[in-house]
Amino acid sequence: MPHDHDHPHDHSHSPGGAPHKHPPLRPDQDDTITYWRAMEIAVRGLMIEKGILTADEVRRAVEDMDNRTPLQGARVVAKAWTDPAYRKLLLSDGNAACKALGIDDGIYKLVVVENTDDVHNVIVCTLCSCYPRWLLGLPPDWYKSRNYRSRVINEPRDVLKEFGTDIADDMVVRVHDSTADMRYLVLPRRPAGTDGWSEDKLAALVTRDSMIGVTFATMP
């Protein structure tokens, strides 16, 4: 009988009985039913059963989240680089600034911190992986890792150097820890030599990592 399985082992499917190995299981393929996964399944099933949500609405919400990219955040940064009034709004009320561009303003308070010649900002979530997903998409694996979450607080310059980002000794490095109801976004410094560039051209210089603060926005 045909069957599906994920555990690696040796067996033969080929003529002559030559053994082969299945590749090891990736973390995102792990179907272990943890406490939180069981809780999510139960709550989702209950909400569908009571008519609060439909299975299709859940599917579309997950699909929408999976399709988000850092392009929305890059639009916000490029607009702030070219429009002083918008930059002022962004730094005072990040959610309102998103809404002004027709971008979902999110369900969390958005605080935008600006990199300057004197201050470099970097964001982290020391408890889990709180992150402005509506602007940056899904967080990278390293952002969620215990290594990054613990070290960037205690030795931010060393961590940034591992990303290839050297911070001058006379610059202040500020680490911002996200919370359950607040998200941070870094407004990188605009690269030199980009005067007169369009917003679209500038947005192409803005990367996810520069909006987390582990790298600079640079010319190609």
Image (cartoon, rainbow, N blue to C red):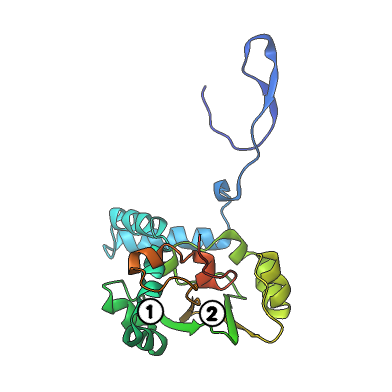
Task: Give the amino acid type for the residue marked by disc 1 in the picture.
Answer: Ala
Residue at 43% of width from left, 63% of height from top?
Answer: 70
| Location of residue 74 in the rendering, given as x and y in whole percent from the top left corner | 41, 68
Residue at 73% of width from left, 77% of height from top?
Answer: 155
Secondary structure beneath disc 1? helix
Task: Give the amino acid type for the residue marked by disc 2 in the picture.
Answer: Ser
- Residue at image mark 1: 80
Left or right for 165, reference 108: right
Q: Which residue lies furthest to the top in this view?
A: 16
Q: How far is the residue under mark 2 from the one under mark 1?
A: 22 Å
Nearer the observer, 183 or 114: 114
Q: Return the mark for residue 165.
A: none
Q: Of discs 2 and 1, which sits in the foreground? A: 1
- Residue at image mark 2: 178
| Location of residue 73 in the rendering, given as x and y in whole percent from the top left corner | 41, 69
Residue at 35% of width from left, 78% of height from top?
Answer: 82
| Location of residue 154 in the rendering, given as x and y in whole percent from the top left corner | 73, 79
Secondary structure beneath disc 2? loop
Q: Mark 2 or mark 1: which comes first in sequence?
A: 1
Nearer the observer, 24 or 110: 110
